[in-house]
Image (cartoon, rainbow, N blue to C red):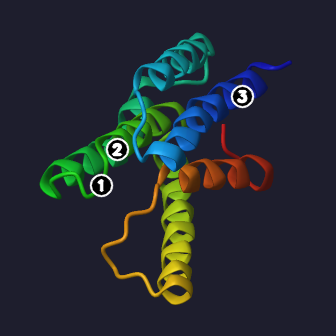
Amino acid sequence: MSSKEILRALVLIMLAFPAAADIRCKKFAILPPFLFFAAALALRLASQDCPLPELAAGALPGAGFLLLSRLSQGALGLGDAVLILFLGIICGFWEVFSILLLALTLSAAAGLFLMWKEKSGRKRQIPFVPFLLAAYIIFCFGGDVL
């Protein structure tokens, strides 16, 4: 198994556990994803193709989402923002930007469907991490992430 495949597996696990918890409870513990993030980051740093400016740039979308979470008083969950930060540091700026764009599109489509199907209002909350996981999987198999 190559280091790229191991890295993908670590990121998938990092997103899968919180996605399941987000669906069930609408919240999740950040420690398990942090451990997988730490392992993925160590693997990424051990490879020679990982310049530090790229890691720092990858953190920018996550930092923006952390600020948005704070300003929205939790409308965007803090855990979601932290996972985006982790994902950005591991994958890089343009990759996480593409993943986020697809995840936001998928979640918007699901929200519109729920509003239409269940006649639910705009205030209904849906978990975001499953869409982040779905977008990552789509990019792993259809694009060039990691």
Front label number (1 vs 3)? 1
Q: Position of residue 70 (x, y in %)?
A: 16, 48
Q: Quadrant of the C terminus?
A: top right
Q: Are marks 3 and 2 in contact (CB under 8 Å)?
A: no
Marks 2, 1: nearer the viewer:
1
Against 138, residue 123 (above or below) is below
Label 2 crowd bin: few (<14), some (14–19), many (20+), radius 10 Å: many
Going 35% across and 48% down the picture, which residue do you hit?
A: 61
Q: Amino acid at mark 2?
A: Ala
Please tell me whether mark 2 sits on a helix, a strand or a loop.
helix
Alpha-carbon distance for marks 3 and 2?
A: 21 Å
Q: Which label number is shown at residue 112?
A: none
Q: Which residue is mark 2?
A: 81
Instruction: Identify which residue, 43 or 111, lies in the foreground.
Output: 111
Q: What is the quadrant of residue 46 in the picture?
A: top right
**Type of residue at label 1?**
Leu
Amino acid type, callout 3: Ala
| Residue shown at the point (17%, 58%) measured from the top left | 72
The residue tagged 3 is 9
Which quarter of the rendering shows the N terminus?
top right
Image height check: is 121 above or below 61? below
Name the mark on residue 76. Answer: 1
